[in-house]
Image (tube, helix red, strand yellow):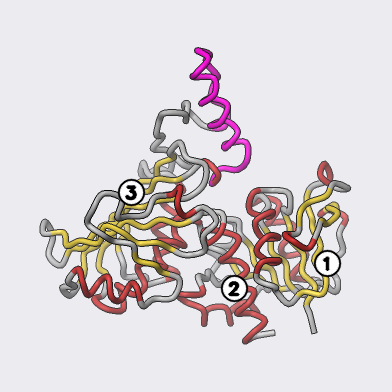
Amino acid sequence: MGYRVAVVGATGNVGREMLQILAERNFPADDVVALASARSAGKQTSFGDRGVLKVHDLAKFDFKGIDIVLSSPGAKVSAEHSPRAAKAGAVVIDNTSYWRMDPDVPLVVPEVNAPAIAGYKGRGIIANPNCSTIQMVTALKPIHEAATIKRVVVATYQSTSGAGKEAMDELLNQTKSFFVNQTLEAKKFTKNIAFNVIPHIDVFMEDGSTKEEWKMVVETKKILDPKIKVHATCVRVPTFIGHAESVNLELERPLEEDDARRVLAAAPGVLVVDRREPGGYITPQEVTGQDGVFVSRVRVDPTVENGLALWVVSDNLRKGAALNAIQIAEELVKSYI
C-alpha cells in the first residue's frame, strides 16, 4: 500500500528538491500533491523522472486523506497550515523554523536521533532542523559518542540558495553586472554578495548574535546533547549551493586524528575525504547534488586540551533540507505508521 503525500511550497528551492528526491528514492507514494500559494496555482512543477504535477492552492486544499505532508513554505505559512494538516490526520514534516523549539515537536536528523520521531504524536508535526545544524550534528554525532564533546566553535560559509531563489538571482545578476562595469543595489542581502562575504544571516538578537547563529546553538543542544556549549558565526558567501563549516571541538577525552577519521568514516551519512595534498579536501562546488555530509581537514588542535578541528561540507538543499525531511518520512513509514 502506498501513501498519499503533499508537498507544501512545491515551487520553491526546497520544495522542488523534495519532489526530485521523492522520485529518485522511489518513496512509496500512490499519490503526490504539489501545493503552493495562490499565485502559483495552476502552474506545473517537475516530479523528477515521473513527469510533472499541477500546483494546487494551499489555502484552499483539504488535507483529509493525506498521510504525510512535506512542508517548506515560510514560517508564518507553516504556523497556519501545518496544524491544519495535522488536524486532518496527516503527519507533517516541517522544514521551517517555526516548530523546531516547540517542546512537543521532535527535531530530527535520522542519523543522529531517529528515535525522537516517536514524539510526533504530540502535535502531529516533526521539525526538520536548520540546514547548517543538520550537517554539523551529523558529523558531530560519532565524535560525541567516541570522546564526548564539551564545546563547539563553528564558523559557517553558507551559500545563497539558503536564502531562496531571489538570493541566487541577486548573486548571478551582481556578478554579471561587475563585468560590464555596472552597479546593482543589494535587495535580498544587506550588502552586495558578489565578490563579498556577509557575516549576517537572519535578524540580530539582543546579545549580538544573529538568529541563524542562535538556531545552531539551541538546535544542537536539542538534537545531540543539552550539555554541549556552542558558539557560532554564520556567514553568507558568494556561492550558489553547498554550505561549508569550520568546526573546532573541545572534547572530554583525547581523540587522535586517525581515530577521528575512522569513527567518522564508519558513521551513517558521513564521507571522509582528507588527503594532505593540494585538492585533497571537499568544497561546496563538489557536493552539489550529493546526499552525504563530507568531512575534510581533520586535525588535532593543540591550543586547547583535547582539541579537534574539522571541515564539514554538504548540499544545503538536499541533506540540509529536502533529503533530511524525506529520510524522516522513510523512517516514519518504516517504524511508526
Camera-nearest label, 1 or 2: 2
Q: Quadrant of the C terminus?
A: bottom right
How crowded is the residue under tag 1: few (<14 C-alpha within 10 Å), some, or many (20+)? Answer: many
Under circle 2, the secondary element is: helix
Q: Which of the two labelled residues, at mark 2 and mark 3, occupies the earlier sequence position?
A: 3
Residue holding disc 1: 63
Q: Is residue 204 left or right of residue 16?
A: left
Q: Is residue 44 left or right of residue 129?
A: right
Residue holding disc 2: 328
Q: Which of the two labelled residues, at mark 3 and mark 1, occupies the earlier sequence position?
A: 1
Q: Which of the two labelled residues, at mark 1 and mark 2, occupies the earlier sequence position?
A: 1
Residue holding disc 3: 155
Q: Position of residue 14 (x, y in %)?
A: 63, 53
Q: Quadrant of the N terminus?
A: bottom right
Q: Which residues are magenta?
A: 162-188
How crowded is the residue under tag 2: few (<14 C-alpha within 10 Å), some, or many (20+)? Answer: many
Q: Is residue 271 left or right of residue 96?
A: left
Q: Which amino acid lies under the numbered mark 2 shown in the image of this protein? A: Ile
**Mark 3 → mark 1, Cα distance in angstroms:** 40 Å
